Image (cartoon, rainbow, N blue to C red):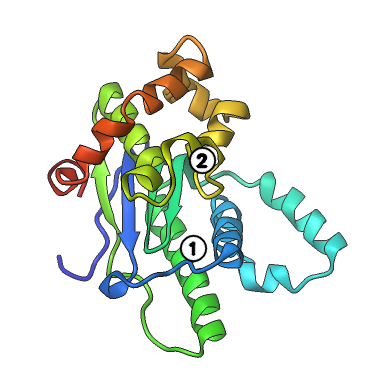
């Protein structure tokens, strides 16, 4: 139904994405990206505390709260992510009922409040409900993970050789410090993390041609 988020199944993996309202830019500088990444990491566990309130606490309280939050069960597992100037992509495994919807609602509401307060604006920042495409096969999972990580190159935001060091993507962390879920669901299809990197990089030029097809296959 229009205006509502899709109903998603627990235990399934989804490619989830949204963009700025009227395709407007939503991340302007490093502080915006850092704020978003902080909220993303914070709300994986669905704490009762708001991220904005957390940021106002003394350092020692923050450290203890982060330890406590880390003990909470996750509501989503982030397999891949990429933040772009006017949109974002996630590959998410839903771990609890409504986990993805709760996670994205808290993240986008938190970031919108920050953005609107800073820029003295009102109203929505994101273009309606998020979109989600269920991942049905390992091949689809790998292809979409590559698509997500190549987004900065496909959009000509960076050069292909700069992709590993793009700060607002999960690629570097996946290659160097993968989570257990990333190892099991993505890297297990490759002999080494370096082979996954080759898998991504071998398709840089091909990915540019996919930009014209993304509406059909991804959105």
Q: Circle 1 sits in a helix, a strand or a loop, which is it?
A: helix
At a point 42% along the width and 62% down the height, the residue shown is 85
Q: Who is closer to the viewer here, 10 or 29?
A: 29
Task: Specify which label sits upstream in the sequence, 1 or 2.
Answer: 1
Crowding around mark 1 (Cα neighbors within 10 Å: few <14, some 14 to 19, many 20+) is many
Could you say which disc has been placed on residue 107 in the image? Answer: 1
Please tell me which residue is depicted at 63% across the width and 29% down the height of the picture: 177
Looking at the image, residue 190 sits to the left or right of residue 55; the answer is: left
Residue 158, percent from left and from top: 44, 47
| Residue topped by disc 2 | 170
Separation of marks 1 and 2 at Cα, in angstroms:
17 Å
Res. 20 visible in picture: yes
Circles 1 and 2: CB atoms closer than 8 Å: no
Q: Position of residue 30 (x, y in %)?
A: 59, 62
- Image location of residue 73, percent across then percent down: 58, 44
Q: Kindly tell me whether residue 12 is visible in this rendering.
A: no
Q: How many labels does the image show?
A: 2
Q: Name the quadrant containing residue 55.
A: bottom right
Q: Which residue is drawn at 42% across and 64% down?
A: 105
């Amino acid at each position: 139904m229009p205006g509502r988020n899709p109903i998603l199944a627990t235990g399934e993996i989804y490619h989830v994405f949204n963009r700025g309202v009227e395709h407007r830019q939503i991340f302007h500088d490093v502080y915006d990206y850092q704020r978003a990444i902080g909220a993303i990491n914070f709300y994986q566990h669905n704490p009762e505390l708001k991220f904005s309130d957390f940021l106002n606490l003394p350092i020692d309280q923050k450290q203890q709260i982060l330890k406590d939050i880390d003990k909470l069960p996750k509501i989503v597992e982030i397999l891949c992510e990429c933040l772009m100037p006017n949109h974002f992509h996630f590959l998410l495994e839903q771990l609890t009922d409504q986990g993805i919807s709760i996670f994205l609602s808290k993240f986008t509401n938190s970031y919108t409040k920050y953005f609107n307060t800073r820029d003295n604006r009102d109203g929505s920042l994101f273009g309606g409900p998020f979109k989600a495409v269920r991942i049905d096969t390992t091949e689809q999972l790998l292809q979409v993970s590559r698509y997500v990580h190549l987004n900065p190159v496909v959009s000509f935001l960076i050069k292909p050789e700069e992709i590993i060091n793009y700060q607002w993507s999960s690629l570097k962390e996946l290659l160097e410090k993968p989570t257990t879920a990333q190892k099991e669901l993505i890297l297990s299809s490759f002999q080494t993390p370096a082979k996954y990197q080759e898998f991504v990089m071998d398709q840089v030029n091909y990915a540019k041609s996919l930009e014209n097809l993304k509406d059909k296959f991804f959105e």
